Image (spheres, grey):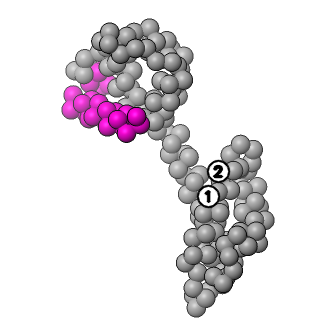
Amino acid sequence: MRDLPFEKVAKMFDPLIKSRLKVLGLTGERFEMFYQAGLIGLWKAWSEFDETKGSFPSLANLRISGGIMDELRKESNREKRIMPMVPEIYENILSKAVYDTIPLLEKEAIAYYLEKLTKLEQRWVVERICNQKREVDIAAEYGVSVGAVKSWRKRVVKKLRTLR
């Protein structure tokens, strides 16, 4: 298989990738992302294939399925980490200026930044920035240590700095 260019191999295994996606119900707007994951799995199989260790179709099948499943796991983990944005949070954020020096942001911009954070980090932003609670009060309210709340802050600052 290594003697064939990858584009030709991709055309040959296109029906397999599409059938895997159909079986898993990954159609519509999600199709393209998972199709790419299947192609990446196929490319990995093509680039590491060794004829002495078995047949290419079985390796390709394994890698395609694995690539799609890995992407499904990543998507599931992203959904677990992201706190659902409720309108009250937006209104709370937009109604308060932080220290009167930071201008209010548009709802879309706020959602963009908050969805990059975990639930705990979002909790820190909402409670500390929006509700202007002290870290001691946040810790008491959620039954965690002040150090834990401070670690949420550190992670938020670190992540937001990389998004600039």
Kindly identify which residue carries mark 1.
37
Count numbered badges in the picture. 2
Amino acid bearing label 1: Ala
Where's residue 5, x and y in %?
A: 68, 76
Residue shown at the point (63%, 82%) measured from the top left? 2
Main SS of the magenta segment?
helix
What residue sits right under mark 2 in the picture?
Answer: 33
Q: Residues within 10 Å of mark 1 (few under 14, many from 20)?
A: many
Residue 17 visible in this rendered orientation of the protein: yes
Q: Is residue 164 above or below residue 42?
A: above
The numbered dot on residue 159 is none
74 left or right of 141? right
In the visual, does 24 lie left or right of 132? right
Q: Position of residue 116 (x, y in %)?
A: 46, 36
The residues tagged by marks 2 and 1 sit, at their Cα atoms, a distance apart of: 6 Å
Q: What residue is shown at x 65% (from left), y 63% (from top)?
A: 39
Q: Residue at coordinates 70% horizontally, 70% vertically from top-left? A: 7
Residue 131 in sight in this render: no
- Is 84 contained in the magenta span? no
What span is colored magenta in the figure?
138-164
Seen in the picture, residue 9 relative to 19 is either above or below; the reply is: below
Mark 2–mark 1 CB contact (< 8 Å) = yes
Q: Amino acid at mark 2?
A: Met
Percent position of residue 75, x then y: 56, 46
Q: Secondary structure at mark 1?
A: helix
